[in-house]
Structure formats: structure tokens, C-alpha cells
């Protein structure tokens, strides 16, 4: 595997590095951690905002942290996948021009968000080098979404989780301008017949985390104003008794009623805060396992991120799960030393 560093136009090979951890996520931003010798060449090459790309992977990472240490003779770099570039833009509400409620198919809603806040915003200073390349098979039903005051990339990832889709970002050359551009590519998850089994030796080093710490099923959201005239909203689940976990979310500083065209839109925005809060307070059900370089199944050939697979665990369960995260580890020779896989439950997040 070769590792390339790009400044959005020129591509150069990083010849010397000590280790690399490369983590991709199917429905969110991935990340990387790179350690390299502290040389003049590496200092000149590894700069913030430059693109990191592997020869065996189309997805990219963007460097956002550089830490050279002379004593250790090491330069450490970290960053996130390309979707994080979109988080440099907030989904704003422009009164009288851009209502927070967007209607259309799933793909049209995402394209509208990208056009308004990255590709062709009213303020040209907000333009990002981004284009939209949806895969075939995305949901075709008309939906209505209220998305406001959220980081753009996180909002799109949230929509992917709501509708059971994956997201990736590819670095390409624009066919018209010849300049580098980030292609945002949502895609349907792929249902496969692949079976991962501890008994068969295709996975090892299993871990399973089950937790209801910080868990919430229902939300009470506080908006602007003071009691007893404070704007309030609730998001219910239908749970009762011991299964009901209520949590309060304060949205008084996120937005004001005057930011919206109607009281109903403000109420919808408060409800969205509750929906997002519940989604971020879900019960943890995380199953993780490892593969060695000599494993029977090969990442990228036999299976990939975003695949739906069957898991036979030594913990005694047989389930269908999503490959939600893959972390590769490389040594200084460029060879892959191992793969860590996270298998997430097949759940669709609650809608507003």
C-alpha cells in the first residue's frame, strides 16, 4: 500500500512513516492517525488541510492536526474523512429566503442542503469544492425535513442513519475545471450472504458492549421564554414504567421564534432537537471483532464497509448486522497488519 499526500491538486508519495490507523465509518466521519519520522521532507509534506489517500482505497482523509516532537523525532498527524469538510458549514435559516422545511425525495433534500450551504450558497465566501454523486437505489418517496443550525456534514450523516443509507467521499478531478473536488456519494447498504464466525476462525478478539448509561427514550425540550410562558416540546416513544427514560434538552440558545416564518416551524425545530437528542442518547449495543492479515475473508475483496452480514459469535448469538466501522492498521512497510470491525444493529433512527 502506498500513501499519498495531496494539496488538492498535486499528489506526492509519503515514502517514510512508522504506523497508520485508518478508520472508515459507513454512516459518519472516519478518522486516521499517522506517525512518521521527523524529517524536513515530512514536515514540508504533512500540512493541515492536505488530503491523505491510500493506494488501495478511494476514500480520503483531511489532515486537521499536526504535531512534530523533536525529542521523539516523530511527527504525528490526525484528521477525519472528507465528509468532515462539510461540517465547516452550518445549515443556516435565512428568513424570507430559505425556510428550514425542505420537501422532495431523499436525494433532492440532500442536494438542496449541499446547494444552499456548499455548492452554490447565496454568500460566495461559503462555497466549498464539492459535488453530489448519488448512487442508484436511494429512496424515492417524497419526504419533508426540517434541518437547521446543524453542521452540514453531520446533518447529512444523520439523514443517512434515518433511512438506512451509507455515505462516502471521493477525491476527484473536475471534468470541466480540472481542479480537485470532493464527490459526496450516498449509497444503499448492500445485503450479503457473508457469515463471520468465531468458530470458523474468520473473526477473533471479540468484544461486546451493552449499556444504558446516558440513555433516553423520550425528550422534553425547552425553547425560548420563561416559565410559565416558555416554549416547550416533547418527543414520546410509547414506552412506560421501567422502559421509559426521560431526558430534558435545553434549546433556548440554539434559535429563536423570530428565526422562523411560523410558530409551527419553530415547534418543528424544537421537536428536531429532541429527536437528535434521543438519537445521541441511544442504548449502546456494540459488537467488535478483529481479523489478522491471514484471515480467510479479505476486506475490500470479500466484504466492505456498509455490507449487511451474518455474525455467529462465541458469546452465543447469531444475528444480522451492519459493518458500520472498519479500522485498518499498517506498519512502516506499508503492509496491512490487521483489521478491526464493528458490527452495528440494523436499526433505523427515529424520525421527527
Image (tube, rainbow, N blue to C red):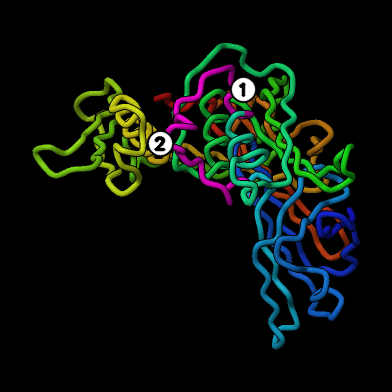
> Furthest-bottom residue in view?
71
**Residue where numbered disc 2 is placed:** 276
Q: Which of marks 1 and 2 is in front?
A: 1
From the viewer's side, name the closer residue of 214 and 266: 266
- Say whether residue 324 is left or right of residue 49: left
In the image, the segment drawn in magenta is 85-111
Residue 97 lies within the magenta run? yes
**In the figure, residue 78 lies in which quadrant?**
bottom right
For marks 1 and 2, give the CA distance.
21 Å
Q: How crowded is mark 2: few (under 14 residues within 10 Å), some or many (20 or more)?
A: some
Q: How crowded is mark 1: few (under 14 residues within 10 Å), some or many (20 or more)?
A: some
SS category of the residue bearing label 1: helix
**Residue where numbered disc 1 is placed:** 108
> Furthest-top residue in view?
141
| Quadrant holding the C terminus | top left
SS category of the residue bearing label 2: helix
> Furthest-left residue in view?
228
From the viewer's side, name the closer residue of 283 and 264: 264
Amino acid at each position: 500500500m502506498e500513501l499519498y499526500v495531496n494539496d488538492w491538486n498535486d499528489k506526492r508519495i509519503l515514502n517514510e512513516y512508522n504506523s497508520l490507523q485508518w478508520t472508515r465509518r459507513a454512516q459518519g466521519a472516519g478518522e486516521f492517525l499517522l506517525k512518521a519520522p521527523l524529517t524536513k521532507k515530512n514536515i514540508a509534506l504533512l500540512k493541515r488541510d492536505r488530503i491523505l489517500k491510500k493506494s488501495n482505497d478511494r476514500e480520503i482523509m483531511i489532515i486537521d492536526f499536526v504535531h512534530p516532537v523533536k525529542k521523539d523525532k516523530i511527527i504525528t498527524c490526525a484528521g477525519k474523512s472528507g465528509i468532515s469538510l462539510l461540517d465547516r458549514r452550518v445549515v443556516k435559516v435565512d428568513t424570507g429566503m430559505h425556510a428550514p422545511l425542505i420537501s422532495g425525495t431523499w436525494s433532492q433534500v440532500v442536494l438542496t442542503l449541499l446547494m444552499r450551504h456548499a455548492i452554490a450558497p447565496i454568500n460566495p465566501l461559503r462555497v466549498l469544492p464539492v459535488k453530489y454523486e448519488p448512487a442508484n437505489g436511494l429512496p424515492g418517496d417524497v419526504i419533508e425535513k426540517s434541518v437547521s443550525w446543524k453542521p452540514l456534514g453531520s446533518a447529512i450523516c444523520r439523514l443517512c442513519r434515518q433511512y438506512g443509507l451509507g455515505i462516502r467521499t471521493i477525491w476527484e478531478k473536475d471534468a470541466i475545471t480540472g481542479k480537485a473536488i470532493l464527490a459526496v456519494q450516498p449509497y444503499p447498504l448492500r445485503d450479503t450472504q457473508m457469515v463471520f464466525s468465531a468458530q470458523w476462525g474468520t473473526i477473533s478478539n471479540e468484544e461486546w458492549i451493552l449499556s444504558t448509561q446516558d440513555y433516553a427514550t423520550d425528550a422534553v425540550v425547552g425553547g425560548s421564554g420563561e416559565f410559565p410562558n416558555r416554549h416547550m416540546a416533547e418527543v414520546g416513544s410509547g414506552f412506560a414504567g421501567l422502559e421509559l427514560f426521560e431526558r430534558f434538552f435545553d434549546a433556548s440558545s440554539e434559535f429563536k421564534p423570530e428565526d422562523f416564518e411560523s410558530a409551527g416551524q419553530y415547534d418543528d425545530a424544537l421537536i428536531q432537537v429532541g429527536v437528535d437528542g434521543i438519537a445521541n442518547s441511544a442504548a449502546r449495543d456494540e459488537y467488535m471483532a478483529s481479523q489478522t492479515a491471514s484471515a480467510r475473508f479479505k476486506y475490500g475483496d470479500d466484504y466492505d464497509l456498509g455490507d449487511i452480514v451474518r455474525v455467529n459469535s462465541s458469546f452465543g448469538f447469531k444475528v444480522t448486522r451492519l459493518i458500520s466501522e472498519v479500522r485498518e492498521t499498517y506498519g512502516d512497510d506499508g503492509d496491512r497488519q490487521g483489521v478491526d470491525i464493528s458490527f452495528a444493529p440494523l436499526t433505523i433512527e427515529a424520525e421527527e
